[in-house]
Image (cartoon, coloured by chain):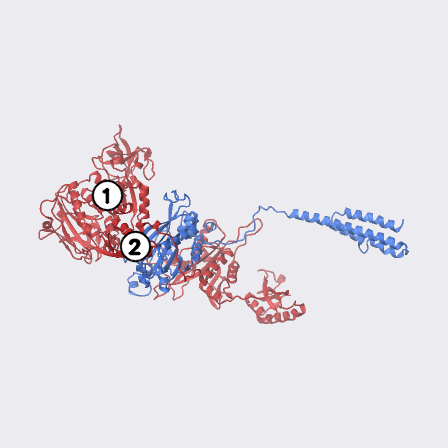
Chain colours: A red, B blue
Amino acid sequence: MRVSLKWLADLVDITLPVEELCDRLDMTGTKVEAVHTLGEALDGVVVGRVLTREQHPDADKLSYCSVDIGAAEPLKIVCGATNFAAGDKVPVACVGATLPGGMTIKRAKLRGLESQGMMCSATELEVGGDGSGLLILPDDAPVGVPFAQYYGLADTVLELEVTPNRPDCLSMVGVAREVAAVTHVDYRVPSGTPEESGTPVGDLVSVEIADGQLCPRYTARAIRGVTVGPSPAWLAERVAACGTRPVNNVVDVTNYIMYELGQPLHAFDMGTIAQCDEKKAIIVRPAGEGETIRTLDGQDRPLASDAILITDPSGPIALAGVMGGETTEVSDATTDILLEAACFDPASISRTSRRLGLISESSLRFERGVDPDLAARAADRAAMLIAEVAGGTVAPGIVDVYPGKRPPAHLPLRVGRTNEILGTSLTREEMSALLAPLGLGVTPVGDDLDVTVPAFRPDLEREIDLVEEVARLYGLENIPSSRPGGRGRIGGRTPAQRFEVRVGATLRAAGLDEHIGYAFGDRADLERLTWDLASDEQLVELINPMSEEQSVLRWTLAPSLLRAVSHNRRRGVSDVHLYEMGTVFITADGRKQPKERLMVSGALAGAWNAPGWNEQARQLDFFDGKGVLETLFETTHAGRWSVRASDRPWLQPGRSAEVIVGGDVVGWLGEVAPHVLDNYELTGPVVLFEVSVPALVKAASRESISYRDIPRYPAYALDVALVVDEAVTAERVTAALRSAGGALLESVHLFDVYRDPQGTPEAQRRLPEGMKSLAFSLEYRTADRTLSEADVRPVHDKLIRKVCGAVGAEVRA
Amino acid sequence: MTITDDLRALEAEALAAVEAAATLDELEAARIGYLGKKGSLTAVLRGLGGLTADERPIVGKVSNEVRQALEGALESKRARLEGTARASRIAAEAVDVTLPGRHHPVGRQHVLHQVVDEIVEIFSGLGYRIAQGPEVELDYYNFTALNHPPDHPARALQDTFYVKDLSGDRAAVEGESDVLLRTHTSPAQVHVMEAQKPPIYVIVPGKVYRRDVADPSHLPQFTQVEGLVVDEGITFGDLKGTLEHFVREMFGPDRRVRLRPHFFPFTEPSAEVDVSCGICGGSGCRSCGGEGWLEILGCGMVDPNVFGHVGIDTEKYTGFAFGMGAERIAGLKYGVPDLRHFIEGDTRFLHQF
């Protein structure tokens, strides 16, 4: 809501400097979003008259004009607007002027012709209204006078954020009432009744309301013999100050009253309305199935059956509260006006205007709730003003159909309860004094108050609504601060939440940066990853996505990380180590909401570090990813885990594995397959892993950590190299060593893997074809003494024989 | 020449040799040359057997003196040589200490999660637990139970992401859906109040979604932290004092806080909370748009209608709720000019915090 202080001062005494007034409004719930000082920014802008308008010889869309600004010589101006003709008065920014948007006008050549200034639109001058063309001024505008002076712009306009519960503040009177209440002064409600003569309106117009819910009140007045034309300057200015383009005197009055009192009005060309029983017959009814109306912008609008129509016996003449109809629009030829001041169902107006994309100042007010008591007063004042600015006579009386009339609401306000909620100790009298200036009727009843709520405050429906009024007028800054006492509460994270914290901390310690990506996914990632969903799984689809790339919810964190790696690579960052912990979504037929699972995923690309003066950059590969997982499982005590070679289509065969905890597959790990790297415009290797966090939490919860004695005696270490078939995994040999080890074997450490390099000539081969050598260091120890060779050797020899038999190994000489 | 003279001569010669030794190796060679098994002094001493009983004590005494002198000289020379050797080794090992150290890759926590963790820590200290809720919500939890009227504009398709409902019920068939991506963390309030009786002290961090195009000041996905307290005797003053404590912990003890009345469907009275600008201290500057204050969160007393949906007695209990955006707080704290940085994963951004 734009509020001209000049206008506001007519309605309420402004006793505070602007800055303090804004603070006061801010602190009582009407936020001042901006303060525009009009006029001062418009030095160098004057009223001009277009003398000639010619086509620019070298540009179709430009014209070349001669403009009188009261100087000795007219200015030559190149202009891109089209809504003007020779003879029009327009604002002209001369060379050197700086417009409110910051643009400074310079002498400039445009397609070969010099332009000595600029003719301006309302937007360029920030005076409110239309930016589509020049601001055309009334004919009586004096040429050469500073525009700001002519336009009465030495004004300050406050832009107020009006919250949805305060429809009353969408009018100057409402704002004046609020200012009066928060600055402790009085305000004035403008009123006025027209001089009436001729045939009473009741003999000219009939009104019928089909549904009192949709239209609680409809009033009509008639003004006959008007002359439609431009508004006088004061009216045009005020309408423009509120941000609406002046149209003509009749329409401008309806807009003026809407801004002043908050009652949207509509003026019909009465001559175009069909009659019934020799009266202009207005019928307010819901739209019929398949009905349409041509609105005054010339568009045919199909209507839903809950739209409210103003009709006459021939059909729809206006879309109630949203937009007038084309057939009954006021034109220059109109002489008789039927003035509508009505009240419509907020929900219906909201749905209709949103469905049609027609959101107007009128619909915005109706959807928040217009005071039904206001209609007749607004009609009286508007009729008076129309007669004043457009001539004509006002027919006596008003047609007023008011099926929705309700007695004023009474609300009890318990003083004690109010103080309990706010933490204050206000007396009944103090509360009463805060509420009364808002226009509420306040009567003491016992210790408490009975509050009569006027119809312009539809938001006050419950006691708590009054408590809020007390709070904001008392001032939140005056409420003493305290903190809850609250015995019986327990703070902190749950065990699962603490585990999640530890997972993050461990991955960071392992060198991975945390990434947060979009939860949105792209269905095309299924193809990019060559990912097959299980037959009972479906992606979670958005009904109204912003784009194809964000049209589903992600089912894996992999694309998020691959995109982040790719983003870094495109910007020249080659070493990228990221992890992300986030929810993935998967659904299935018959499910309303998807399953949500917390996953942790990591990506490694490049090296841990850039090459340094004393260290090499080593290309990260599968085993770096596995090392991260080893660190993760060891540090978080997430149980015994293993990996098993297992192909995933998005991972490179032979370098991919699934992660197993307690027999269950809880994730996967591997290097991204070359075709997938291509799809994400990456060069490899890129290592990826993904593990279910709840699975880790579960495993960790089963794991109990218990103390083991620190060894007091040294270990006895023996090394052995075992030659085995390529197909025999390290894990199998290690497991065989462990299981055959007996009580003395403490640890098994694989320290070397040897293969003859590919293409080694037969003579130089150190191992038989298809075999590899795994070298282990075995440590033997017992708790109560130092072991000797005599203790260990027989055990060791027996162990090796057993293992060789079990896995088909030979001891390498 | 007596044998004693021989010994003295040998002593002089040996001491000179020790003195002349320039390295530990030469010193060792000298030691072996005189005191080794085949050393010249050893040879002399071996010849003592042929002496008379009178000569023996005298020669024995001298030879001992010679040996001791020699050993003493060897020892002090060794110490000196070792000292020199260590000193030269140390000199050789000197490094340019300004050369960079070996890099130890340690990852960074995302700045948004640093902020969220800080908020969680502060409220944990005040006795709040951490609650969570689904990101794919029902209209009921996101809007209805939070007292949004049926035609509330936030429900519109242009503002809220809706999710295809596969349950097969009528609404899904008609292409309408009451399943959506939560637009705030507030639905978790309703879940918490359904699941547990007061006293309730919870904080709810999580992702939320709104249909905005990503630009410097909007993201379709962002991070909120919600707070909810329901207990006997909770007042607006408690809300105010709690948030004042929070802001001072989060932004520093010299920052001021103000609550401005506002409107939210699910709280009443409601307020927006501003913190004094950290750049200008409240006098107004570019970074606060000249206002001196920066808006950081919304809050209010839980609306009785919300308690009505979850069956909490509004006469017995009162409560407050608040919600804030982690992006907003991180943006203010660190001056991040473009929200998209938070979601792109550029490691040069991640490493700044």
Residue at the far top in the pictured view: A72
Residue at the image position 10 percent from the left and 44 percent from the top: A197
Residue at the image position 29 percent from the left and 43 percent from the top: A158
Residue A249 x %, y %: 18, 42
State whether residue B66 is above or below residue A151. Answer: below
Residue B134 x %, y %: 38, 61
Q: Quadrant of residue A102?
A: top left
Q: Which residue is mark 1?
A: A11
Task: Confirm whether residue A729 shows in the render.
Answer: no
The chain identifier of the residue carrying mark 2 reads: A
**For marks 2 and 1 on the same chain, the one whose residue lies earlier in the sequence:** 1
Q: Nearer the viewer, residue A161 or B321?
A: B321
Q: Which residue is mark 2?
A: A467
In the image: residue A55, left or right of residue A222: right
In the image: residue B63, left or right of residue A69: right
Q: Are marks 2 and 1 on the same chain?
A: yes
Task: Name the residue type under label 2.
Answer: Val
Regarding mark 1 in the picture, which secondary structure is present there?
helix
State whether residue A431 is above or below residue B190. Answer: above
State whether residue A255 is above or below residue A86. Answer: below
Q: Nearer the viewer, residue B268 or A662?
A: B268
Regarding mark 2 in the picture, which secondary structure is present there?
helix
Residue A742 x %, y %: 60, 71
Q: Which mark is residue B186?
A: none
Task: Name the residue type under label 1.
Answer: Leu
Q: Which is more foreground, mark 2 or mark 1?
A: 2
In the image: residue A599, left or right of residue A427: right
